[in-house]
Image: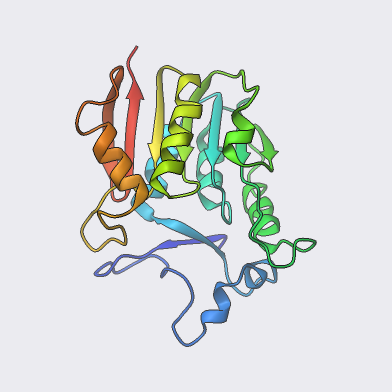
């Protein structure tokens, strides 16, 4: 198994979220690198399917916040054959920077697919936005979850999404048996901007578990 997705209470199949309670040390990314566990997704199976659906035939995809690379793999497996996937993450939280297990697991996970091209951008998202010129078909916003940070990502990057393109916010909905709460930054931002009509030119396209998808009007 290359990766494991979040299993919600009541689900009878799929991989459990994280490591078993008696073995919390398995959550460390070094364990994935050593083959002791698969790469851990921070999303559900239904969300994984949504990533794949929205990535289908896209030519330019941007993901902000990569973690162990499972969502990026979902995007890469369905994007156009000659597409480019830009992965933005500073990978700055490693306690042993020269080893940086999270980054190494992410690279191995994403590179398990050879579809299209991947560009790794090891910067904070606001720095990566400076000088950006590409038209974006799909952007996944899953970086810093503070409300102000999510809004900054939206302001920095939404202008590059082409008409008909889409943006996905992760951890942006409260749903049954889920992990999000009304106090989550992405939830607050989405409720404030999009559910109250504060983002003209964009339409709510889909909501799946914690995912909130909007599409730019053509």
| Direction front: furthest residue | 148
| Residue 217, above or below 67 | above
In depth, the one of 162 and 192 nearer the eye is 192
Tell me which residue sits at (28%, 50%) in the image: 209
Furthest-top residue in this view: 218
Q: Quadrant of residue 215?
A: top left
Q: Position of residue 108 (x, y in %)?
A: 68, 54
Q: Which residue lies furthest to the bottom in this view?
A: 22
The part of the image, by quadrant, that contains residue 204 is top left
Picture residue at 63% right of the left edge, 34% below the top: 127
Query: In the rendered view, would you say 182 is above or below 157?
Result: below
Quadrant (top left, top right, bottom left, bottom right) of the C terminus? top left
Quick check: 171 left or right of 121? left
Residue that appears at 65% across and 47% down: 90
Question: Would you say residue 72 is visible in this rendering?
Answer: yes
Q: In this view, does 188 lie above or below 19?
A: above
Residue found at x 50% / y 44%? 74
């Amino acid at each position: 198994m290359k990766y494991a997705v979040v299993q919600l209470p009541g689900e009878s199949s799929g991989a459990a979220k994280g490591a078993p309670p008696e073995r919390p040390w398995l959550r460390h990314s070094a364990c994935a690198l050593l083959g002791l566990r698969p790469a851990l997704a921070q999303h559900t199976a239904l969300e994984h399917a949504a990533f794949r659906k929205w990535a289908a035939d896209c030519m330019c995809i941007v993901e902000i916040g990569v973690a162990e690379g499972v969502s990026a793999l979902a995007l890469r497996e369905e994007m156009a054959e000659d597409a480019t996937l830009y992965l933005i993450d500073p990978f700055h939280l490693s306690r042993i920077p020269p080893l940086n297990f999270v980054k190494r697991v992410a690279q191995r996970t994403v590179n398990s697919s050879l579809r299209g091209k991947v560009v790794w951008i090891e910067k904070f998202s606001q720095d990566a936005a400076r000088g950006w010129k590409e038209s974006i078909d799909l952007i996944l916003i899953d970086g810093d979850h503070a409300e102000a940070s999510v809004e900054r990502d939206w302001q920095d990057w939404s202008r590059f999404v082409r008409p008909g393109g889409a943006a996905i916010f992760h951890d942006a909905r409260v749903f049954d048996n889920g992990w999000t709460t009304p106090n989550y930054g992405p939830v607050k931002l989405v409720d404030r901007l999009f559910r109250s009509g504060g983002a003209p030119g964009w339409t709510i396209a889909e909501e799946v578990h914690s995912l909130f998808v909007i599409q730019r009007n053509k």
